[in-house]
Image (cartoon, helix red, strand yellow):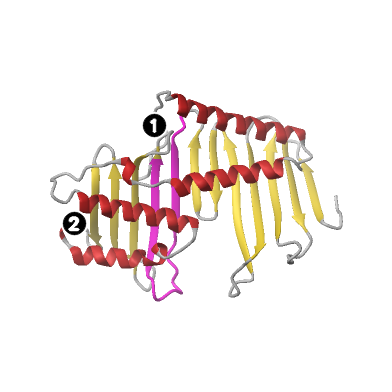
Amino acid sequence: MTSHKSERSFSFNNNGEINFSKEVKKDLTHKNPKKISYDVTFNVLSSDFSIDIGLSKLSQDWRKEFIYDNISISLTENILTKKFNDIEIIEDLNTGMKLVIIVKKHDKRNRQNNASIAFETVLNPDDSLEMGAIVINTHKGNGKINGTYRFDVSRKKGIHANFYSRKGVKVDLTTNLMLLETANNLLLPVLNSKNRGDIIVSNFANSTQNAIAKNLSQRVLSFDSSDFNMETVKQTEAMIIEMLKTIKGELPLSGLVKRINNCLNLVNKQHNLEIDGTPKTLKLEAKN
């Protein structure tokens, strides 16, 4: 299906899978500063679906003409996965528990920063922090890991900050301010960034170190979820859901719309359960 604005494609497979895509043909201009293209897949034999969205818009920054964002939403057996660029939020719609993952890979071409960062956190149904971790790996010129800085927080185990050398030597960062400062320098690019994923990592790192400073006199560093701000995660989720609602209205496949509505109802139901304070169990667990 082709018009002067866009091109839409359909495919129907004998295994029940249906694919649909929309590609906007118009160039970005000041009159048309934003365009949305997407690919959709679902199967008539299940309630699952997946949608990949490409969002392009004109930049207000003279150094960068366009901004490209990638958004995806997929539902598989009541596990809802939402992605915005490097942020991945995996939600169990049966329990309301969420796993948030952000990975920033080592770029060999960037000689000023030889670090990679992996962030994971588990959130309760009320979006309070259950556990979380930042792992900062430094890399040699050949890409191999040279050392690891790790910040861990957990309701059960409290707060820990350690450095692990390439040979496996463990150093407590709370007793070695020089290594702690090195870890902070490695985090500088994300601390000064306006990228959503960087803001989440930055907020967690700052909250962890503030909690460490507040509890240094204690033998065990205690954990208080109110110290950790997950507002950017909630804002990102809300933006992804609004984008799903935006494209839902123009989808020509009633079976797909029905699946999306069912997904949104499950999300709303889970939110209402959170308000009611219904007990939940943890099904999603962060990787070690």
Q: State whether residue 124 is above or below residue 54.
A: above
Look at the numbered discs 1 and 2 and tell me whether their residues touch, using CB distance below 8 Å: no
For this rendering, which residue is in front, 67 or 17? 67
The residue labelled by disc 1 is 282
Q: x%, y% of residue 93?
A: 51, 31
Q: In this view, does 217 lie to the left or right of 125?
A: left
Q: Looking at the image, is mark 1 or mark 2 earlier in the sequence? A: 2
Three-letter amino acid code at disc 2? Thr
Residue type of the residue flagged with mark 1: Leu
| Residue 104 colored in magenta in the image | yes
Residue 133 place in picture, x, y as percent: 34, 49
- Provide the secondary structure element on which disc 1 rests: loop
What is the magenta range? 95-122
Q: Which mark is residue 166?
A: none
Would you name the residue on which mark 2 appears? 174
For mark 1, does the 10 Å Cα neighbourhood hold few (<14), some (14 to 19), or many (20 or more) residues? some
Residue at the image position 76 percent from the left and 65 percent from the top: 27
Picture layout, residue 111 above or below residue 184: below
109 and 100: which is toward the camera: 100
Q: In front: mark 1 or mark 2?
A: 2
| Label 2: element kind | helix
The answer to whether residue 16 is magenta is: no
Res 82 seen here: yes
